[in-house]
Image: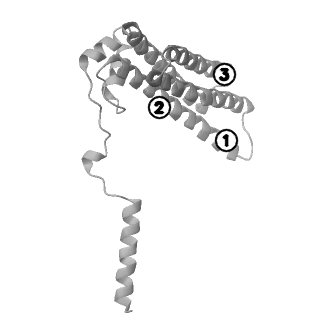
Amino acid sequence: MTSLTCFLILLSLYATAYARIHPLIHPTQSQPRTGLVSPDVVAKACEPSPDKALCVSVLKSQTIGDVNDLKQAAYVAIQVASSEAVATSEMIKATRRREEDKDVVEDGIEEETLADCAMNYISLVEILSDAASALMTGPESDVMIEVKAAMTTAETCEKSIASGRKSHMVEEVAKKNENVRKFCSNALSVYNVYAAQH
């Protein structure tokens, strides 16, 4: 084998490996597709919402699926709350890992607050998953119970935060937790509209 042949084989292997690691993405594929949304369904679903702007934004900009009826709207609202809860849970875990990697624990109260919220979010993520499942496969009466339980769990994390010291990390968790609470409240409101019509 000549050195040129070896070089071409290595170049070919490198290009194949590089393509697997960095696939070419068409510009239109980089953005997730927004589902088809019925303006009438969104208006009806968001009418009683305590935060109409949030509700409309959630249902119009989501990428989970189409929103052509109230059940789909309720499902999307629950899934958006669930996605935010998962992101918050992951943020808390990453924050705790950073703290654990330090040689000296700077603030035991901060760690306790984060540990409490981490436990809350393990439950909260599961509760919202159960709510979405109940909506799709039944019993639908469990949806309201599950979403209310998720809101209570977020409030428990909020109480842990309120009783602890306010560090930058805890403040970030507080902001994410408040977003989860708002998304859960929105999901409950949209579900209640669906349940009243069903």
Front disc: 3 or 1: 3
Q: Which residue is mark 2?
A: 83
* Mark found first going from the N terminus, 3 or 1: 1
Along the line of sight, the residue nearer the viewer: 98 or 2 = 2
Q: Which residue is mark 1?
A: 99
Q: Quadrant of residue 148?
A: top right
Q: Which residue is mark 3?
A: 160
Front disc: 3 or 2: 2
Q: Are marks 1 and 2 in contact (CB under 8 Å)?
A: no
- Image quarter where the C terminus lies is top left
Label annotation for residue 110: none
176 above or below 152? below
Name the amino acid type tagged 3.
Ser
Q: Percent position (x, y) of residue 196?
A: 40, 7
Q: Percent position (x, y) of residue 101?
A: 68, 47
Name the amino acid type tagged 2.
Ser
Q: Percent position (x, y) of residue 13?
A: 39, 74
Taking the spot 49% from the left edge, 28% from the top edge, the residue there is 82
Q: Counting other residues with Cα less than 10 Å from the Cα at mark 1, is it few (<14), some (14-19), or many (20 or more)?
A: some
Name the amino acid type tagged 1.
Glu
* Mark found first going from the N terminus, 3 or 2: 2
Along the line of sight, the residue nearer the viewer: 65 or 29 = 65
SS at badge 1: helix
